[in-house]
Image: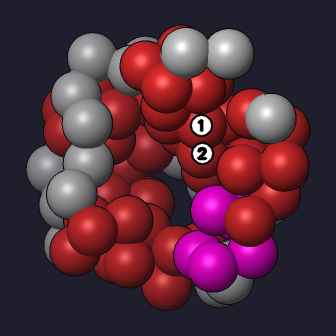
Amino acid sequence: MPKATQREKLHSSILRTFRDERIRKGLSMNVLSQRAGLNQSAISLIERGLRSPNLETLIRLSEALGVDLWQIIKDASSDAE
């Protein structure tokens, strides 16, 4: 698989995992944005794949959701292969 395609799959899988975790925990985008110290519109753009979060944003989201960022990346990497 070309690296760009693998990278896109990895990106999509990571963002989908964050969205699914937010929904599983019953959190609104507004509550998540408050916990993570981010703008609600930024959360929406990230979840829809219209904005690529930087590492700081991923860390904030993982802390706000109480999930292990490293595990999300590992799982997404396995899915992308």
User: Which residue corresponds to mark 1?
Assistant: 10
Instruction: Examine the residues drawn in magenta and state their main secondary structure.
Output: helix
On the rendered image, what quadrant is the N terminus found in?
top right
Q: Is residue 70 left or right of residue 61?
A: right
Q: Nearer the viewer, residue 3 or 38?
A: 3
Q: Amino acid at mark 1?
A: Leu
**Residue at image coords 37%, 49%:** 30
Query: Label 2 near label 1: C-beta < 8 Å?
Result: yes
Decide: few, some or many residues near mark 2? Use Cα within 10 Å; few <14, some 14-19, many ≥20: many
Q: Is residue 9 visible?
A: yes
Decide: few, some or many residues near mark 1? Use Cα within 10 Å; few <14, some 14-19, many ≥20: many
Q: Position of residue 24 (x, y in %)?
A: 84, 50
Which span is picked out in magenta? 69-73
State the SS at label 1.
helix
User: Which residue corresponds to mark 2?
Assistant: 14
Q: Position of residue 58 (x, y in %)?
A: 38, 65
Q: Amino acid at mark 2?
A: Ile
Q: Position of residue 53 (x, y in %)?
A: 26, 48
Separation of residues labelled 1 and 2 (CA atoms)? 6 Å
Would you place residue 37 above or below residue 12 in this image? below
Disc number placed over residue 37 in the picture, else none: none
Q: Quadrant of residue 68?
A: bottom right
